[in-house]
Image (spheres, rainbow, N blue to C red):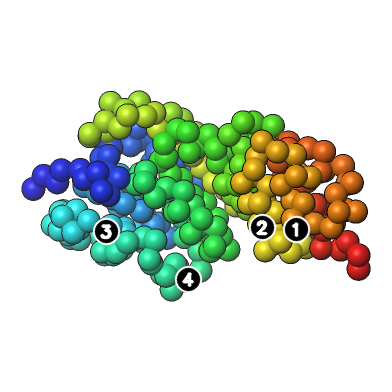
Amino acid sequence: MNVKAQKSYGQHFLKDTQVLHAIVDAVNQSRQVLPLIEIGPGMGALTQYLIQIEAPLTCIEVDNRCVTYLEENFLNKSKQFNLLNADFLKVDLNKLIAEEAFVVGNFPYNISTQIIFKLLDVYQKVPVVIGMFQKEVAERLAAKHGNKVYGITSILTQLIYDVEILFDIAPESFLPPPKVMSSVIKLTRKKDIPTDFNYSLFKSIVKTSFNQRRKMMRSSLKSVVNKEFLQDKYFDLRPEQLSVADFIELAKKIENYGK
């Protein structure tokens, strides 16, 4: 059985053995003794190696054609293999993950950012993620303040995880080849995640600021901050100039102003 990649699923099947080995090596080097969750296994190019790791492996695949292929080729290879025919974005991860799990995959490019946001919602249960992204998305996730691609996804991700780009992958490594370069990144949950601030306010400030990223913070936040407070040093800057720690401090100041 041969499954042809469908654009509607954002599918680009990884075929390069060297790249597959590099991903598995990264998993083995990073892995604690945890169950594995593979997002979007497709035809099982990566699954064939992950299933050899001594750990429970759950594959989440929405494409019925791929599910049939995986059932025929992998269900009898390990008693620790579980296949879930579902849209990852609709899966209840709190029910799926008992305690903690290591997430890995050649993520469908059309929902890769949504995957990250979904994982951020359950970060307590996901200490490590190794995933394939479009290179520009990977660079955005890893960007530090002062970088032109630094933005909302950078800040919300880096609040919880250390982000490392492991290596880049050329289009020829996939079938069909995408029109862009790809990158594998590793997210490692931080040991000390700040919690002493209003996260909802923090998130609102970040999003409001970057919705007008070319403007100074004074201009973009004038509708949500008292005019007197707009004299603070942060409001002389543009949002990409503020670090994650700066946004946390700003959220604290805004919440405490006038108390």
Question: Secondary structure under badge 1?
Answer: loop
Residue 73, disc: none
Q: Amino acid at mark 1?
A: Val
On the image, numbered disc 3 is attached to which residue?
Answer: 62
Image depth: mark 2 or mark 4 in front: 2
Task: Give me the disc on residue 94.
Answer: 4
Q: Disc 2 marks which amino acid?
A: Ser
Q: Upstream in the sequence, badge 3 or badge 2?
A: 3
Mark 2–mark 4 distance (CA, rounded to whole Å)? 25 Å
Give the labeled residue for mark 2: 204
Q: Quadrant of the C terminus?
A: bottom right
Label 1: how many Cα within 10 Å (few below 14, some 14–19, many 20+): few
Q: Residues within 10 Å of mark 2 (few under 14, many from 20)?
A: few
Type of the residue with mark 4: Asn
Distance from label 4 to label 3 (Cα)?
19 Å
Please report contact status of discs 1 and 2: CB closer than 8 Å, yes or no.
yes
Q: Nearer the viewer, mark 1 or mark 3?
A: 1
Q: Residue at x 64, y 31 (%)?
A: 147
Residue 161's spot in the image, x, y percent? 60, 49
Residue 104 appears left or right of 67:
right
* Distance from the alpha carbon under mark 1 to that under mark 3: 41 Å
Q: CB atoms at circles 4 and 1 under 8 Å apart?
A: no
Mark 4 or mark 1: name the one nearer the start of the chain.
4
Sequence-earlier tag: 2 or 4 = 4
Residue position for label 1 = 224
Residue 86 as seen in the image, left or right of residue 158: left
Q: CA distance from mark 4 to mark 1?
A: 34 Å
**Front tag of 4 and 1:** 1
